[in-house]
Image: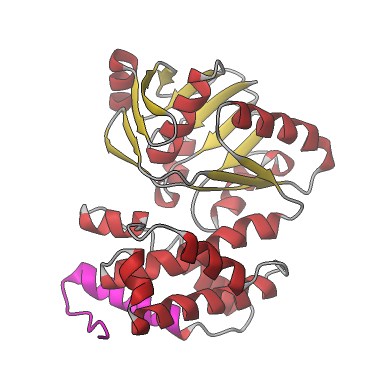
Amino acid sequence: MRVAVLGPGGVGGLLAGALERAGTEVVLVARTSTAAVISERGLRVKSVIFGDFVAHPRAVDRLAEPVDVLIVATKAAGLEPALERIATQPTLVLPLLNGLDHMAVLRERFPAGSVLAGTIRVEADRPEPGSIVHTSPFLLVDMATGEQDIAPAMQQLAALLTQAGVPVRVLDSEARVMWSKLVRLNALACTTSAYDKLLGEIRSTPALRVDLLSAIEEACAVAKADGAQDVDAPTAVAELDRAHDTLGSSMQRDIAAGRTPELDAIPGAVLRAAARHGLQCPTIERLVAMIEARIAGAPTGAPA
């Protein structure tokens, strides 16, 4: 399979590097300046799983050639302008963005049946163009499709990623793929960003752990109303309880770096879905307000 990756940040760069090192033909699609850096220096990866290496995928600022797979790994806010760089129709589109709303955007832009439901669980960042830092051994891609015609191609993509050292689960429900990550990510992102603390301290501080659990329970209620009947709070809680103490969130890192956090893509998606189903999420709403206050420089009033 010929694979294109749109967005060579922490997620896209890590996958592009792993795939290229395993022998897959990979094309990275990026801004002109970033593509130039990668073309000149390669893609430098420091990973707790894959080790330190330099990959040399071809990097372009516009994709017009045919590819079998397009992995979309931009931030949600940058999706639509990034799609202007794509002038081809891949057989499969695997989005690995946070949230839910990007699915409708992609299914309007590409043939709807070609767009898989997909998520990735990973701690990876791009400190500078062409440099990827992968800091946690946890790595998992989930995918699903309701289109039987492309199920064989999806299985082929899953095998390709697995051979490159990226664990993959092919699930039987698109709703499960999207919500099983979102309920966990939303709680982690909201609590770590509202209080600017890592997961270990969130878990060990009783009042903060209550917020973590309440955010999970609220999002799980929304998930079930949205069709993800097999997404449950105990599973999400157990996953976060197994995670290492120093786990943070990309939202927390974005705030620290002065970048725009994905408030709209992560808790915003949960709250919009809740509104569609007539549900209330008071803990998530309060945490979002605290994050907005932090960004604005106001006191957050973290509980003791």
Q: Quadrant of residue 150?
A: top right
Place of residue 241 in the rendered image (x, y in percent of width and height, measured from the top left): 47, 66
First to last magenta residue range:
283-304
Q: Which quadrant does the C terminus fall into? A: bottom left
Place of residue 170 in the rendered image (x, y in percent of width and height, measured from the top left): 71, 44
Between 183 and 294, the one lying in front of the other is: 183
Between 65 and 182, the one lying in front of the other is: 182
Place of residue 146 in the rendered image (x, y in percent of width and height, measured from the top left): 78, 49
Place of residue 5 in the rendered image (x, y in percent of width and height, measured from the top left): 50, 30
Q: Is residue 289 above or below residue 150?
A: below
Between 51 and 218, the one lying in front of the other is: 51
Residue 87 visible in image:
no
254 horizontally vs 268: left or right: left
Give the residue displayed 66% in from the left and 67% down from the top: 231
Q: Which quadrant does the N terminus fall into? A: top right
Q: Is residue 252 above or below residue 170?
A: below
